[in-house]
Amino acid sequence: MSEDVQLSKICMDFGSFRAVNNVDVTIKPGEFFSFLGPSGCGKTTILRLISGFMEPTEGSVKIGGKDMKGIRPNARPTALIFQNLALFPLMPVWENITFGLEVRGVPKAQRRAKAEELLQLVDLHDSADKRISQLSGGQKQRVAIARALAVEPKVMLLDEPLSALDLKLRQHMRAELRAIQKRTGVTFIYITHDQGEALAMSDRVGVMSQGILQQVATPQEIYNNPVNGFVASFVGENNVFVGTVKGKSGDIATFETAKGQFNARLGANVSVGDTTKLFVRPEFCTLQKTASKSANSIAVEVTEIAFEGNFVNVFVRDESGDTHMVQVQNDPSIPTPALHSKAHMIFDPQSCMILSEATDTRSGH
Amino acid sequence: MQELLRRYGISLSVIMVAMTAFWLLALVVIPNLVLFKFSFRLYLPVDQLGGPNDVYTLKNYATFFESPIHINVFFSTILYSSFVTAICLAITYPLAYILAKVLKSTDTATFFLVLLVPLWVSEILRSFAWFIILSMQGPLNAVLLGIGIIDKPIRWITGFQSVIVGLVYAYILFMLFPIYNAISALDTNQIEASEDLGASMWRTHWRVIIPHSKPGIASGCVMVFMLCAGSVIVPTTLASTNSRWFTEIIQQWMFEGLDWNTGSAYAFLLLALCIIFVSLVMRILNVRLVDIAK
Ligand SMILES: Nc1ncnc2c1ncn2[C@@H]1O[C@H](COP(=O)(O)OP(=O)(O)OP(=O)(O)O)[C@@H](O)[C@H]1O
Ligand SMILES: [Mg+2]
């Protein structure tokens, strides 16, 4: 039903520009894997390498153990859902869905039945004979998914398929896509620049920057243990402190900054003596009246309170004038701090990390 | 119209509209109406004009239907015009596809420039060039003899073959541009989606690209067909004695016979019959006129 996808040290050059640099990852059969990264980092290029519209300059793409070199997209066991969907406007919905079967010579009656079945699967009844232009954005989305599923691909490739939808529908379609993936068991490779989407849907996430795969891990791992500053700041919010690593005991290091000394976990590739950054998530910070002895603490003044519904963002300013954010759950029984009140921002050494910058970018090339 | 007024003010707008109207009326509508009226009158000696014989009649039109030779020429004109249209389509469609979707846009620009340069030369010179190329002692025979493909010169300018060559050359760009535009407007992702779903290149053309470019193909075909059927210069330059074009007969009536009445009747017949033919073909191929206008 599903196959693994093995990307072995693939590079893709456009002229002298390296769009994908040494990406090496194996996506397991039946996995929901997301590539997450900012615009232009090479995500679409990776999908096009897997689907066969491009061949890598270096390295190889294997699907189910079979090297895909020289195999055209129409002979690969993949189905691609394009960012703009690319439905065929001149065919009715059902012909769109079964186009892949039509080219395989499946008779019309059988195709029609399959279309009805797939329309059920994507929760789109009575639309078989509609024209594409008569569908809403979300419905087109479902037709595109059904069209890709019709060819029973081993691997489904999705290029930011939800980016054109509004927030509500997007959240609904996330759950839907995830459910379809579980039901069919097909390997899904999903591309997005929306971290919330990647974290919520995926079994594993690969975070990319400038053509380089920075980290591959489960969503929890990515969020709680980012390997470097790029991953930490691309996925989620952070309070950042610049400083130098002074000493180290166990996995906790002391970090000397202009605002005082902090204790924090030491990330990979960082050693004593390095000047780098400390990252702490706003929800791991608390505000207290008094400074803490055991945890890191910094004297601040509350400057702004933003009520976000289920949580509250409290913005505070330290003595050197830098702003930090503390995120607290919305709980009416606990009073929110008063504006302009003095407090101490406290964060535990276990919940903050000293990280290096992103893994070396294109300089090695 | 509002936009026109806003941009150019009232006086300039009036001048522009008036000039367009003048062009349409004075140079297109009125001369045609005059000829149309002519076509229902008899060709009479000057002294009988206005006399009892000067009546409205269908006799000029009947002349055509009573002449098997003219009917024959009419059908070969339709036949060979269709033939030229088909050849143009067969050459142009792949070319338009390559220009629109395969080549880089900088290469496309150069290519179009090269294609357009010959248009700077007048049609009569271009037909004449073919006359020279295809003549018995011309370069084509010389080359073929030189590389040993033939061992004695071939008479190219006989039957309709030289006319076909000339017409294809003269009007092929009228086919290329609409098809190129239509294919360019197609989202490349659609072609890729088709291939990704397993379609062969042929299937992708048949099911995705051709249906999308059908309006462009239709307008190219209508244009080329009408231009061919109405062409005068190419047939007169390149036809031989055994191949006559319908326009040549109209010309004969008008300039050799000085019978403008029968000549205009023939001209309107050509127009009407071509329109009927084109609409029939469009009906069969299920293309609507509004699609073409788009
Ligand atoms: N055919 C091409 N020729 C030259 N450069 C290209 C080509 N395709 C992509 N690039 C370049 O490669 C880089 C990565 O492009 P890619 O489309 O993979 O980005 P992406 O991560 O999908 O971005 P987005 O989120 O904006 O879609 C970009 O800098 C882009 O300009
Ligand atoms: Mg992209």
Image: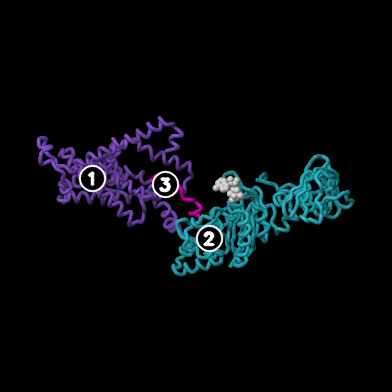
Chain colours: A cyan, B purple
Q: Earlier in the sequence, mark 3 or mark 1?
A: 3
Bounds of the magenta span?
Answer: B176-193
Mark 2 = which residue? A143
Pick the residue in front: A101 or B260.
B260
Most distant residue in the right direction:
A293
Relative height, residue A105 to residue A82 (above, below): below
Residue A111: where, in percent of width, then height? 47, 67
Most distant residue in the top direction:
B11
Question: Can residue B187 be found in the magenta stretch?
Answer: yes
Q: Quadrant of residue A59?
A: bottom right
Residue B158: where, in percent of width, then height? 22, 46
Label 2 CA crowd tier, 10 Å (few <14, some 14–19, many 20+): many
Tag 1's secondary structure? helix
Label 3 CA crowd tier, 10 Å (few <14, some 14–19, many 20+): many
Residue B202: where, in percent of width, then height? 43, 57
Label 3 CB-ligand 1 distance < 8 A: no
Q: Is residue A72 visible?
A: no
Relative height, residue A320 to residue A211 (above, below): above
Q: Are marks 2 and 3 in contact (CB under 8 Å)?
A: no
Tag 2's secondary structure? helix
The amino acid marked with disc number 2 is Val
Q: Are marks 3 and 1 in contact (CB under 8 Å)?
A: no
Judged left or right of residue B162, residue A238 is right
Pick the residue in front: A128 or A309.
A309
Mark 1 = which residue? B268
Dominant SS in magenta:
helix
Q: Chain of mark 3?
A: B
Q: Are marks 3 and 1 on the same chain?
A: yes
* Residue at position x 49%, y 51% in the image: B188
Per the rendering, the mark at residue B180 is 3
CA–CA distance between discs 3 and 1? 32 Å
Question: Can residue B122 be found in the magenta stretch?
Answer: no
